[in-house]
Image (cartoon, grey):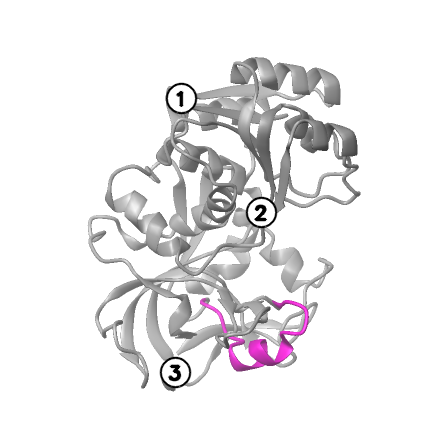
Amino acid sequence: MKAWRLDRLGGTLSLKDIPVPEVRPGSVLVRIAASSLMSYLRPYVEGKLPHYNPPKSEFTIGTNGVGIVDAVGRDVWHIKAGQRVMLSSHFAARENVEDPAQILIGLTAGAGAERVLADWPDGTLAEYALAPVEVVTPADGLEHIDAPQLAAVSRCIIPYGGLIRGRLAAGETLIVNGATGAYGSAAVLLGVAMGAARVIAAGRNRTALEAVATAGGSRVSTLALAGDVAADASALRKACGGGAHIAFDMVGQARDPNATLAALHSLRRGGRLVLMGSMTVDLPIPYTALMLNSWEIVGQFMYPPAAYLRLLDLLRGGLLDISAIRPRVYPLAKLLEAMDAAAAASSLEYVVMQP
């Protein structure tokens, strides 16, 4: 089969002919129909991003995908050959222990998870992928959605993990901070799908905010942030009609904490702030305000194992509309060109590779 192989970060990336993996106990072999690209794949490959801990030897890159099961190994009882499935990159060691090691297959290992990644190093930018059964979710009942469009679900799964961790409930008011980014825009659509009565899309790019609001519908309004904590918090509270029940923070590589602090101060009493973005500086927590308002701050990495099941249920039930997130499809051989397209894609676009 063809597979994009990377020998090390900053090293050689090449399309190679390698053997199709053989199934082993607890594994599923999937023929890839579509693989989503991360917007930052090129700097990752070039070794320009900190905090990544890739496999120690050559590996196939690529994270989430859509495909058809080709074969299953022993100890796989429910997934069947010929079944359409979603592949997740997030895998936690299966032992029943307090803190199982976590990896992102085809990308990086968490602290102390190098041996797990050594067992499951290879991702989805190939004609076939072998995956642990725990990261494989049936996509039955979605045959009317083609593989490139269905791959948009991988854009939604990360913010969905944050929203369920933040306990977003139907009828609540949600602020999405960083709504002009790829995951932030998906969080706006998810807020609508999960029944939020009001979703405030907050960011600094007015044009991108309006595009997200149009995609989200009548329950979405926008607020362009000015960078002043007090003024932005006041404007957010006014847009919420008195404060938000939950603020979801998905700002990427923020150089100051102002937008996140504004989101925190926009919460009503007992409100929750979920942190899933990234920041290059520390977040100063207002101890007294946090205590007096009974605010809750929650950090969330990725999503629980059952999240893909529930997310696909939202899609099957017609609650989540992913049609606004538009795929740009490239053949597998055109990865170098596709990486540049992924970096330049708008918040409502994504790049998909097809073998």
Percent across and percent down for residue 25 are 37, 86
Residue 343 x %, y % = 58, 47
Residue drawn 46% across and 73% down? 3
Q: Dividing the image into 4 quarters, which one contains the N terminus?
A: bottom left
Q: Nearer the viewer, residue 88 or 4?
A: 88
Q: Residue at x 32, y 83 (%)?
A: 75
Q: Which mark is residue 219?
A: 1
Identify the image quadrant of residue 282: top right
Q: Is residue 260 visible in this depiction of the protein?
A: yes
Magenta part of the protein: which range?
Answer: 109-124
Label 3 secondary element: loop
Note whether 129 is above or below 257 in the view shown: below
* Residue 118 belongs to magenta span: yes
Classify residue 123 as left or right of residue 355. Answer: right
Q: Earlier in the sequence, mark 3 or mark 2?
A: 3
- Say if mark 1 contacts mark 2, CB within 8 Å: no
Let me know if residue 286 appears in the view: no
Amino acid type at image mark 1: Arg
Residue type, label 2: Ala
Residue 193 falls left or right of residue 84: right
Q: Amino acid at mark 3?
A: Val
Dot 3 corresponds to which residue?
20
81 in relation to 291, above or below: below
Q: Is residue 270 one of those drawn in magenta? A: no
Crowding near the residue tagged with mark 2, few <14, some 14–19, many ≥20 C-alpha atoms within 10 Å: some
- Report x, y in % for residue 47: 71, 63
Which of marks 2 and 1 precedes in the sequence?
1
